[in-house]
Each structure stands twice: as C-alpha cells, then as structure tokens.
Image (spheres, rainbow, N blue to C red):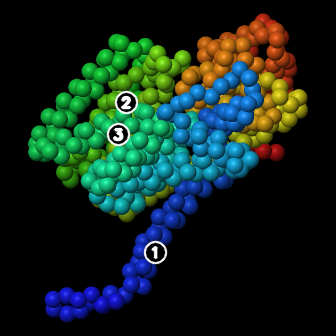
Amino acid sequence: MMVATKDRPIVVDVRVLVGNRRAAFIPYALLALLIAIPCFWQEHIQSVDLSSHLYNAWLVNEVTAGHLPGLHVATQYTNVVFDLMLSFLMRHTGSVVATERIAVVIAVQIFFWGCFAFVSAASSRRVWPVTPLLAMLTYGVVYRIGFFNFYISTGLCCFALALVWKKRWPWLAAGLLALAFLAHLLPCIWAGGVMAYLYVARRLHARYRLTLLGASALTILALSGLVTYFVPSLSPSGLHVDSLFGVDQMLMWGAKYRVVAAVCFFYYVLVLIRRFDRESPLRDISFQLWVLSALACLFLPDAVWMRFYTSGLSYITIRLSLFCAIFLLPVIATVPLPRLAHVVPVLAAVVFFSLTYLDERSLNAVEGRMQAAVSALPAGVRVLAAIHDPRLYVQGLEHMIDRPCIGRCFDYGNYEASTSQFRLRPEAGNFYVLADNGDIGALEHGKYVFWRKDLQVYKLFPCDEGKFCSAPLVPGELVASQQLNSLAARRD
C-alpha cells in the first residue's frame, strides 16, 4: 500500500504492520497462560471460601429446581457475580471441577490484567519488571481466603481506574464500575474515592497537592472515628507495617511465607529510598494515593456490623492492604534499577509459588480423605466438620467439607446462608443448615451444642493414620473443634 505525502509517497507494507501487532501480542498471551497455571496444577483449587461458594451454588440450583424446602433464594444486587457464574457453569457443565476451574481462571485474569492496566496507566509504561510481584498478589491471601466477589470487583475497578487515568472512554469506565458493584461494593467505594481525588489533584498546581493530601488524610481519620463511634466495629490488633506495603498478602499457610514477605518488604523499602534519592515523590499522585490507602489500612476498623446483615463485614484490613499493594506498584515501577535488582522479585515469586504448590498438594490430600469419609455415609446425610490447623495463617480447613458434599451430603454448618450476605437464605427449623448466625460463630469457636432431636447429623473428625471418621451427634453434645496438621498430610 502507498501513502502519499507532500514530498514523496511512502510505501507501507500491511503485512509488516500485522506481523508487528502479532509479535506485540505474544508476550501478553504467554503471560496470560502462565498466570493461569496455578489453577490447573492440582486436583482441586485450594481457596477457603471457594468450596463454600461451589457448594452454595449447587444448593441454589437445587432450591431453584423446587427442592430443599426451608431454603429460598433472595434477590441480591451486590456480592453476587461470582456466585451467579458458578450456578450457571454448574448447570451447564455438570462438573464441579470444570466449574471451579473456568470460574477461577476468569477471576484471575480479570484481577491480574485489571491491576496490570492500572499500574501501567499510573506509571505511563508497561510494567513488566513488577509482574512477579503482581503475580504473587494475584494468588495472595485474598485469593486464598476465597473472597472472589471482592477479588473480581477489584480487578474491574482497576480497569476503570486505568481508563480514567488515561482520560479514555468514560462510558466504558462507568459500565465497568456498575459490573464491579454487582461483584462487591467495597472496591467501588475505593475506586470512587480515587477518581474524586484524581479529578481534584489534576486541577491543582503540584505545590498544592500536599494540601489536598493533608485534607484527605484528615477526612480518612474523621471517617474512621465516625464509623468507630456510630457503628459496632472491631479495630485491627496492633500496628501491621506489613499491611501498609501489602506484603501480608503473601502470609498464607505457615511461618515459611514470612521469608518471602520479608524479602518483598525490604525490596519495596530499598526501591522507595532510591526513588527519594532521585526525586521526591511527595507530589506524585500515585504516591499520595498509596499514603492514603496506608492510612485507611491503619485506622479503619477490621470488621463492622451493619443492620442489613446478620453477620459482620470482616477482614477489612487485609482487603485494604491489597489496595496498598496495588498503589505501591506504580510508585516503584518508575524507579530505574540495576538489572541484578530485577532478579529479587523473580526469585521471591519462584519460592512463593513453589511453597504454594507443595501446600496445595497437602491440602488436597486432606480433602481426598474427607471425600472418602463422606462417601462411606448414607446419601443425603447432614454433616458437621469443625476442624482447623493452628499452624495456618489462612484456615484452609474451615470449609473443606463443602466440596465433597456437593451432590452427596449437606454441610449443616454452612455459614453463607445465615449471614444474609449471599443469595441463599434459611428458614428457622430447616433440615439443611444452621439458620442462626450465632450458632455458626459458636461452631467455629468449638462452643456449639447440638440440640435437634428431629434431625440426624454426623460429626466428622480426624482419627487413626490421618483418616477421617464419623459418628452421629446426640442432643446436648458439644461439637468440639478438632486440630489437624494438614500440611503433614502428603499423598501416599
């Protein structure tokens, strides 16, 4: 093809342009494949609430089909996208494994590429050097706890923030925020505050941005005080410096992850020192947003109880620490470093994912033994499993019984229905799940006493040779919490 100019024609080879685009696309495609690998390398994905989400998606489909009297499906407008996806996939694939893999891969890609787009927009460059850090965030604590609605919402909000940062397609950003609201409200509040700050900061001279930062910091402190005074809440315990840098996102299954977190912490600190040596970032909007996120993480409550929920919105600090980590990445991504320094996050990621592979294998071994115990029980039986591992920072055993029960039994201690935060809702006296959220709390703390005389419920507990045994509960029996060293349970 020839393109005419004033002086002479310019020959443009369309095949070269197409080839260049394909070549530019290849790194993104390879990275998308690499980031999905941990969703396939074990028999099941070990993420605490994932088992519960899958189990409740199955229950919702059963209730919708007219089964399970005493349970009903409520209309809900937030905290629902991931659950709708699971119910749809379970109906159309008929496979729990296919459902969990497809849904989680979609969630992972949304989160990773949303964060990648935002960090690239905020730092005005493709941020390949920090992708190992972003990969660890993608499979960090929020992922392992299984807050997938929050996780998806955060990724969508990051996409919207990237568009707003670049001043492109505001209508698309609004649509992404609407979809993010269906996933979870909290990231939308965060993104709305960021957009408001960005709007004002860009209209101020750089020397006045510190004044805006101070006013915003005071607003966060005032909001924290108001929430603490007017809303029943629980403040974070102690000063968690690791939360300010988001490295607590790497603390999952035991103390060994503290090594990875410590390496990342010192890496962040040293890069920040280098950033200050070259040029003060105090007037940089990304740096200011990180400071404000850190203040919110320090002073806002870790849990709040609202009237429209029967249980509290908890783990707020760990969610806010994820925002801190996301905002910190564009601050350090612009710092030129020696080539050797880029090896540090790569090595940290290699250690991190090696540890998660081994620990997921152990947890899958425990779930396999639970599956065997459940298979020995009569079909449709009610089961309680109050099992935990005190060595784990993220309690990987808390809802592990849920996935083995799909299509086979009913987890009588299923927590979702009683919280009123999800679609499935129980009626008092139903035969499938505890309807009182206070009973769920007592069960989690080993203080629940079983009183039902009209219902046969079996307790599941660890017994000889790492196996699980079962026994029927009798009215008046205390369901004590059982301890298990889950990471020692390797496959035979």
Q: Circle 3 — which element?
A: helix
**At label 1, which amino acid type do we have?**
Arg
- Tell me if mark 1 has few (under 14), some (14-19) or many (20+) residues whose alpha carbon lies within 10 angstroms of its own: few
Place of residue 190 in the rendered image (x, y in percent of width and height, measured from the top left):
35, 36
Q: Is residue 222 above or below residue 364?
A: above
Which numbered circle lies on residue 22? 1
**Identity, as a three-letter code, of the amino acid under mark 2:** Cys
Residue wearing tag 3: 191
Q: Residue at x 65, y 53 (%)?
A: 40
- Is residue 388 visible in the rendered structure shown here? yes
Q: Closer to the camera, 80 or 193?
A: 80
Q: Residue 139: x percent and y percent?
A: 53, 46
Considering only order in the chain, which callout, 2 or 1, is on the residue closer to the N terminus? 1
Q: Is residue 363 above or below residue 105?
A: above
Relative to 366, does residue 225 appear above or below in the rendering? Answer: above
Q: Residue 481: in sight, yes or no?
A: no
Q: Are marks 1 and 2 in contact (CB under 8 Å)?
A: no
Q: Residue furthest bottom?
A: 8
Comes first in the chain, label 3 or label 2: 3
Amino acid type at circle 3 is Ala
Q: Is residue 274 left or right of residue 145?
A: left
| Comparing labels 1 and 2, the label whose residue is closer to the camera | 1
Q: Looking at the image, which residue is at 83% across and 17% down?
A: 456
Relative image position of residue 13 (x, y in whole percent): 37, 87
Marks 1/2: CA–CA distance: 42 Å
Q: What is the distance, in whole Å, between disc 3 and disc 2 at their CAs?
A: 15 Å
Look at 31% across and 54% down and name the residue there.
Answer: 169
Quarter containing the N terminus: bottom left
Residue 297 disc label: 2
